[in-house]
Image: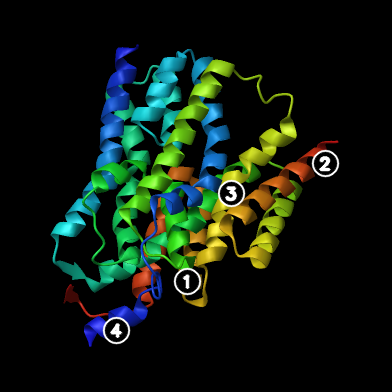
Amino acid sequence: MRTDLVIVAVVVGLGTWLFRFLPIRLRGMSEVRSTRLTRALESIGPAAIVTLFIASVLPDLAGGTQDLLPFLIGCVATVIAFLIKRNVGLATMAGALAYGVAFAVLRG
Amino acid sequence: MRRQQLRDAAPPAIDGAVGEATLVDGIRASVPIVVGYFPIAFSFGVAATRFGFSAFEAVFLSVVIYSGASQFMALTLLSGGASVIVSIVTLLTMNLRHVLYGPSLLDRADTRAQTRHSWAWAYGLTDEVFATTIGFLAGASKGWSEWFMLGIGAAAFLSWVSGTAAGAFAGGGALAAYPAVEAALGFMLPALFLSLLLAILNRREIPVVTTAGVVCAGVTLATNVTSGILAGMIAGALVGIARFGQAPEEEVV
């Protein structure tokens, strides 16, 4: 195995784990918390979800490597399925299925 | 009084929760991630072999780094001759956003949430696991638990690693004959994020979500996806603070 690959993987893997783990550990050790920090942390969840959604579609849409119509059909199907069933898993599957069908039909 | 103000402002994550979520609840919640991860990891395995890495090296990267976007970047950097230092700094910068996930999650779970085994489940605290757990807490009748985190994290991890292995060993032709299936699988993660957004969205979150989305889109188009995600999350957090302008300074928990 390539030495540079092993070094990069181990250091980045360790660093990423520390990014995920240390804030949890340090939070448990702290007794004094800022209210502003608490409110910032509460808002990060919704902010992260919307940014991850945008980041997962925007580069391909803007770059022209993803067609707009299947994307819109997939999104509409996801929203409708969620409003009917209130289930994240089912809505995700319905959106992906609708996207795949729209893709197949439009590509003929 | 200050405590009461804070409680009133907090999301109703586990109000009315009966019992703790189990390992099986975590595995069940992981299904959209598992289905969404596999094709992306498959693509990573294919890409790794195309860049000249062995199947074993591809799986090694998935097991040790376990962070999708930075793994693809690692292939580009390592095959392009970038130095080890530059590669490490670039990839760690891409993953810096993960420092926000653990504290944010625990704030929504419970201030007394157990974290004894966080060294284990934190390893699997990816973007998707974080987002799905937030969605679970918003809608579930059960409370957060470390077993839930281990279940959702382990299932997602196994999907990622097995997808990488399948892609590395099968090569690029496996899904080439089924472009619609490949397209549908590629839409799994966007659909998952959209579903999670619908699950957590309420009137209180609209300013945060709108600001984060606009900032993320602008920065992504102007620079890159990693900067866009980080900028959007920070902007959302700042709006979260600003909405409660009369907030007290410090509080002892």
Measure the alpha-carbon separation of dots 4 and 2: 53 Å
Please state if B33 lies on the left or on the right of B62 as rendered: right
Measure the alpha-carbon separation of dots 3 and 2: 20 Å
Q: Position of residue B97 (x, y in %)?
A: 35, 48
Q: Which of the two labelled residues, at mark 3 and mark 4, occupies the earlier sequence position?
A: 4
Q: Secondary structure at mark 4?
A: helix
Please state if B189 lies on the left or on the right of B108 as rendered: right
The kind of residue on which mark 1 rests is Glu
User: Residue at point 71% right, 53% down?
Assistant: A72
The colour scheme used here is rainbow
- Label 1: chain letter: B
Q: Is residue B3 at all visible to an observer of this figure? A: yes
Pointer 3 residue: B190
Pointer 2 residue: A106
User: Residue at point 39% right, 20% down?
Assistant: B78
Above or below residue A73? Residue B198 is below
Pointer 4 residue: B5
- Label 4: chain letter: B
Q: Of residues A105 and B72, which is closer to you in this image?
A: A105
